[in-house]
Image: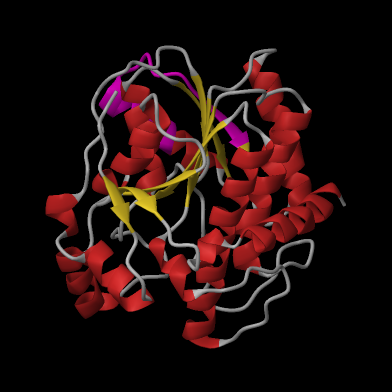
Amino acid sequence: MVDLPEYAAPPGALRRLMGSSLRQAARTLHCPDTPRLDQKLAVVTGATGGIGLEIARGLAQRGAALILPCRNLRRGEQTAQRLRSTVGEGVRVELVEIDLEDLDSVRRAASEITRAVAGRSLELLVENAGIWPQRYAQTRQGHEIAFGVNLLAHFALRRELRRLGALTAGRVVVLTGDIYVLAAECTPDYRWSGPIGGMQAYCRSKLGNLWIAGELARRSPELEVRTVHPGVVATNLGGEPGVLGGSIKRRIMITPEQGAQMPLLCATQPGLESGGYWHNVHGRMRLAPDDPASHAAAAAKLWETCEALAAA
């Protein structure tokens, strides 16, 4: 069992975010190559690029059999080929079509995953896929797009997998971001405009991820639930940065491979606290009672909202 540090999150959003991002490359924790995951079944959303691809690669290198829900099956097949070329031809990768903007598609994907596991239960679900919207949009069911994709679609996928018996125990890893500290609410009907609005929509969804993960751990003790801040990672999340922005990204952000390390730690290492919040630099984060993520009543209310929306 790996020994991870603990850290009490400091008050103040600016202090928190600066402490998270300074010298990340040198401070990011690294996942050991063991234990092995031979033939364990793992679902990773958003695995066709960025952190998700590196998480999938890390799990495959440890022997896991992968089921990758993806919106574009052609791109999914390219991802499968990349994994086979870097990990080995014996890598087991199965693709399932999903559109996280459409709950009907999510339900169909859950049924396909259930058929793929053939009576077994998944050992691992990594809820990684997410968007930072550049303009206001809604999902097929009329929910604000960041809420719908980053939070509700994963809630519905997990809920349906549980209902169908494909996730009876095992581990659930939920990716969030420390930037959630800039939000105080998470609702499906948030209206916004402009780049600041898009950022706030993203922050709200990341706060919602923490609330829902905490509730999941409380309501389903048979699951091991870990919420992860992977780091401030140089991906295309939030759109292309331009030449100057790209240079800044490379200087202060970490690579997707580095960003996959804490999710992999939470996915593979035994003995980590269920319901905890894990940080790429600080390890186990202890949150103050007045931290937005610590609002138990808001978390319970959001769970009931998602339950009603996912069941509709």
Asked if 148 appears above or below 259 in the picture, the reply is below
In this orientation, which residue lies closer to the viewer: 253 or 79? Answer: 253
**How does the figure colour the protein chain or chains?**
secondary structure
Asked if 19 appears above or below 64 in the picture, the reply is below
Residue at 68 percent of width and 13 percent of height = 118
Please tell me whether residue 84 belongs to the stretch shown in magenta.
yes
Residue 40: tell me if it is visible: yes
Residue 82: tell me if it is visible: no
In this orientation, which residue lies closer to the viewer: 39 or 179? Answer: 179
Give the total of numbered labels: 0
Q: Position of residue 88 (x, y in %)?
A: 30, 19
In this orientation, which residue lies closer to the viewer: 250 or 15? Answer: 15
Q: Position of residue 151 (x, y in %)?
A: 62, 55
Residue at 22 percent of width and 56 percent of height = 254
> Residue lying furthest left in this view?
26
**Picture quarter containing residue 16?**
bottom left
Q: Position of residue 214 (x, y in %)?
A: 58, 48
**Picture quarter containing residue 269?**
top left
Question: Position of 147 compared to 132: left or right?
Answer: right
